[in-house]
């Protein structure tokens, strides 16, 4: 196997603070706040307007998606993504750093990291520790909105990093790909409800292995190191030398699986974009496994 040199998936708060202090922000380096919270809890855009990393733009994941899809958080078109990130001053030559304000340290940032990668952009990193640790370490914040000069971004969909319902359905029989579900154990087993969901019971795709995404993070909100991450995959008997699909509820925390594998030197994990939100509504009942009342294993 040819060893591929991977772009750094993580940057430190110290590195970003120094880059901002020395005037590196601009067409070559852009920062995005990709926070999103469940309705009725926190307001991501409002919090961004109150305080954010200096120079950061707000990446609205509700806006940058396929709004015509009946499923949650589906990818926008190539043209839609290109137009959206171009307005944020991002070109194909920009190093993009993504963070969010979740108390876990990272929640939605890996989804945006994966979105850039699936649209052909490799120079993208997640801020390790997130806004939580940026604040804790006393780095500067501002309420000043950023107004980057618009740029031209050309998006080219990398289908190898994306899986569709039909491909996952076919995989039930071929078993060419391992399937990892990143939701909590209760939601995976079907013993706990899906939060804020109407008409969506919990459970999982037949044959999936459960690796809750929170296990990839330390208590302090940083990504665990490669050795610890490898051990997590080994414990679950997930072979990183073999093809892997990540799934969750709506294709967000699945990107934590892709990021963790990337940090172990495996850059080719594909995300099932529709995830459980689509599978529950479309798949044959025998392909859905749940210990809950409404589904039979």
Image (cartoon, rainbow, N blue to C red):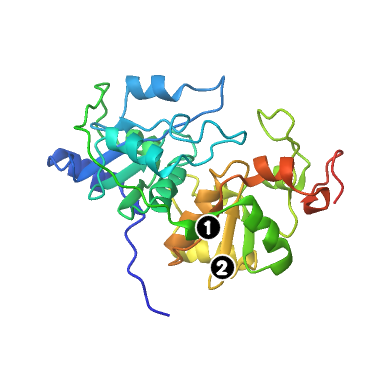
Figure quadrant of the N terminus: bottom left
Of the residues under marks 2 and 1, which one precedes in the sequence?
A: 2
Say whether marks 2 and 1 touch (CB < 8 Å).
yes
Q: Residue at x 56, y 22 (%)?
A: 39
Tell me if mark 2 has few (under 14), some (14-19) or many (20+) residues whose alpha carbon lies within 10 angstroms of its own.
Answer: some
Q: Position of residue 191 (x, y in %)?
A: 78, 41
Marks 2 and 1 sit apart, C-alpha to C-alpha, by: 8 Å
Left or right of 93 in this view: 292? right
Q: Position of residue 208 (x, y in %)?
A: 69, 57
Left or right of 242 in this view: 237? right
Question: Which one is nearer the viewer's eye here, 54 or 147?
Answer: 147
- Res 221 seen here: no
Left or right of 276 in this view: 86? left
Q: Position of residue 118 (x, y in %)?
A: 43, 52
- Res 206 seen here: yes
Residue matched to label 2 = 243
Residue 270: give its label.
1
Assign a secondary structure to mark 2.
loop
Q: Residue at x 70, y 47 (%)?
A: 185
Q: Which residue is drawn at 60% across and 44% down?
A: 274
Q: Which residue is drawn at 44% across and 63% down?
A: 267
With respect to residue 6, does 129 lie above or below? above
């Amino acid at each position: 196997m040819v060893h591929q040199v991977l772009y750094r998936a993580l940057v430190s708060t110290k590195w970003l603070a120094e880059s901002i202090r020395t005037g590196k922000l601009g067409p070559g380096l852009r920062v995005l706040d990709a926070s999103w919270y469940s309705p009725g809890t926190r307001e991501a855009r409002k919090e961004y307007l109150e305080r954010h990393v200096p120079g950061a733009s707000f990446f609205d994941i509700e806006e940058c998606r396929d709004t015509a899809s009946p499923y949650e958080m589906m990818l926008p078109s190539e043209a839609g993504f290109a137009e959206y990130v171009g307005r944020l001053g991002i070109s194909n030559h920009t190093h993009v750093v993504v963070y969010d304000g979740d108390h876990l340290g990272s929640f939605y940032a890996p989804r945006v990291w994966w979105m850039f990668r699936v649209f052909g952009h490799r120079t993208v990193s997640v801020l390790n520790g997130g806004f939580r640790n940026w604040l804790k370490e006393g780095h500067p914040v501002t309420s000043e909105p950023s107004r980057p000069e618009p740029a031209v971004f050309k998006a080219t969909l990398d289908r190898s990093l994306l899986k569709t319902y039909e491909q996952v359905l076919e995989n039930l029989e071929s078993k060419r790909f391992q399937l990892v579900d990143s939701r909590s154990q209760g939601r995976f087993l079907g013993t706990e409800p899906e939060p804020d969901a109407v008409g969506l019971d919990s459970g999982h795709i037949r044959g999936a292995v459960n690796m809750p995404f929170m296990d990839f993070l330390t208590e302090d909100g940083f990504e665990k190191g490669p050795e610890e991450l490898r051990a997590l995959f080994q414990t679950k008997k997930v072979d990183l030398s073999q093809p892997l699909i990540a799934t969750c509820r709506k294709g967000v925390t699945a990107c934590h699986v892709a990021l963790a594998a990337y940090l172990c030197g495996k850059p080719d994990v594909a995300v099932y974009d529709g995830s459980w939100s689509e599978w529950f509504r479309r798949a044959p009942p025998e392909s859905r496994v749940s210990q809950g009342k409404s589904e039979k294993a």
